[in-house]
Image (tube, rainbow, N blue to C red):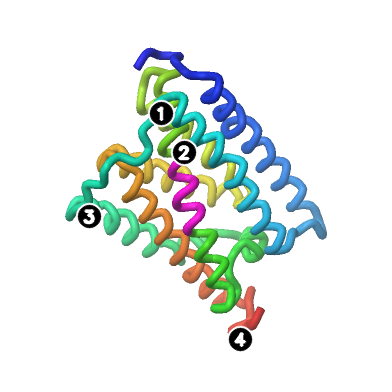
C-alpha cells in the first residue's frame, strides 16, 4: 500500500479518534477532579456507550473505503490459547498489586467506574463486551492500518495508537495510563502475531470482565466499599 493513500473517510476517522476523543477525555478528567464533580455511574455508562457509538460507524466506514480487512476467516488453535493465557495470567495476577500502588484519591476516582455488587454484573458484562469488540476494531484494526499507510511503519503506527489509546483513558490517572499503554501494546502484538482481531477481542473482554470483579474485592478490602453493598 502506498504511503498517504488514505481516503477522506479515513482522515475523518483519524481526526475524530486521534484529536477529538483525547481532548474530550482530558477535559472530562479535569472537570471530574474538581471538588464535588465526581460523576455518577449512570453518566459514566452513558459516556462509554456514546463514545463507542460515535467511533464504530466511522471506523467501519474507513475500513470499507480504505480497504482494511477486519474479519478474515478465523484460524484458531493452540497458539491463540497460548496468547490468551500469556496475557491474562500476568496482568490479572498483578492487578491487586497495581491497585495498591494507587493513592486513596485515585482509588476513589475509579470506584464509580466499577461494579459495586453482583447486581451490577449485567451492565459490567455489557461494558466489557462492547469495549472488547469496538476498541479492537477502532484501535487495533482501523487506526493502526491507516497510520501504517501514513507513516510507512507498523511499529511507528503502533506507538501512535498506543499513545492515543492511553490519552483516551486519561480519566483513570497517570499510573493507570502507563498500565493501559502496556496493555495496548500487548493487544497490538497479539493481533500482529495471530493475524486477526478475534483473539485480542477475546482477551480484552475477559480481562475487563474479571478486572472489574478483582478491583471490586480490592475496594471492599480497603474499606472503600461496604462488604454487604447492595447497590
Element at label 2:
helix
Q: Residue tagged by mark 2?
A: 139
Main secondary structure found in the magenta portion: helix
**Tag 2 or tag 1, which sits nearer the N-term?**
2
Q: Give the Cα separation between the discs numbered 1 and 2.
A: 9 Å
- Determine crowd level at label 1: few under 14, some 14-19, many 20+ residues with C-alpha closer than 10 A: many
Q: Position of residue 129 (x, y in %)?
A: 47, 58
Q: Give the Cα separation between the discs numbered 1 and 3.
A: 25 Å
- Determine crowd level at label 2: few under 14, some 14-19, many 20+ residues with C-alpha closer than 10 A: many
**Tag 4 or tag 2, which sits nearer the N-term?**
2
Q: Residue tagged by mark 1?
A: 145
Asked if disc 1 and disc 3 are in contact, CB closer than 8 Å, the reply is no
Element at label 3:
helix
Q: Is residue 212 above or below residue 167?
A: below
Quarter containing the C terminus: bottom right
Residue 228 numbered mark, or none? 4
**Tag 3 or tag 2, which sits nearer the N-term?**
3
Element at label 4:
loop
Q: Please tell me whether mark 2 or mark 3 is closer to you in this view.
A: 2
Q: Residue tagged by mark 3?
A: 82
Magenta residues, start to end = 129-137
Q: Residue at x 57, y 40 (%)?
A: 55
Q: Give the Cα separation between the discs numbered 4 and 1.
A: 47 Å
- Determine crowd level at label 3: few under 14, some 14-19, many 20+ residues with C-alpha closer than 10 A: few
Q: Please tell me whether mark 1 or mark 3 is closer to you in this view.
A: 1
Asked if disc 3 and disc 4 are in contact, CB closer than 8 Å, the reply is no
Q: Give the Cα separation between the discs numbered 2 and 4.
A: 38 Å
Amino acid at each position: 500500500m502506498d504511503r498517504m493513500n488514505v481516503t477522506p473517510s479515513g482522515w475523518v476517522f483519524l481526526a475524530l479518534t486521534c484529536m477529538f476523543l483525547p481532548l474530550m477525555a482530558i477535559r472530562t478528567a479535569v472537570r471530574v477532579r474538581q471538588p464535588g464533580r465526581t460523576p455518577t455511574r449512570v453518566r459514566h455508562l452513558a459516556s462509554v456507550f456514546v463514545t463507542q457509538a460515535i467511533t464504530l460507524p466511522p471506523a467501519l466506514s474507513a475500513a470499507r473505503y480504505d480497504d482494511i480487512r477486519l474479519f478474515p476467516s478465523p484460524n484458531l488453535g493452540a497458539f491463540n490459547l497460548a496468547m490468551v493465557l500469556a496475557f491474562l495470567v500476568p496482568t490479572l495476577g498483578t492487578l491487586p498489586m497495581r491497585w495498591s500502588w494507587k493513592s486513596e484519591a485515585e482509588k476513589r476516582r475509579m470506584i464509580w467506574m466499577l461494579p459495586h455488587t453482583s447486581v451490577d454484573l449485567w451492565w459490567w458484562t455489557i461494558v466489557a463486551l462492547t469495549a472488547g469488540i469496538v476498541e479492537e476494531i477502532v484501535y487495533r484494526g482501523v487506526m493502526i492500518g491507516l497510520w501504517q499507510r501514513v507513516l510507512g511503519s507498523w511499529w511507528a503506527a503502533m506507538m501512535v495508537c498506543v499513545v492515543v489509546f492511553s490519552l483516551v483513558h486519561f480519566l483513570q490517572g497517570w499510573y493507570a495510563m502507563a498500565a493501559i499503554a502496556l496493555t495496548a501494546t500487548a493487544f497490538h502484538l497479539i493481533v500482529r502475531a495471530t493475524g486477526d482481531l478475534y483473539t485480542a477481542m477475546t482477551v480484552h473482554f475477559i480481562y475487563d470482565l474479571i478486572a472489574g470483579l478483582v478491583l471490586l474485592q480490592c475496594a471492599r478490602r480497603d474499606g472503600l466499599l461496604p462488604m454487604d453493598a447492595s447497590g
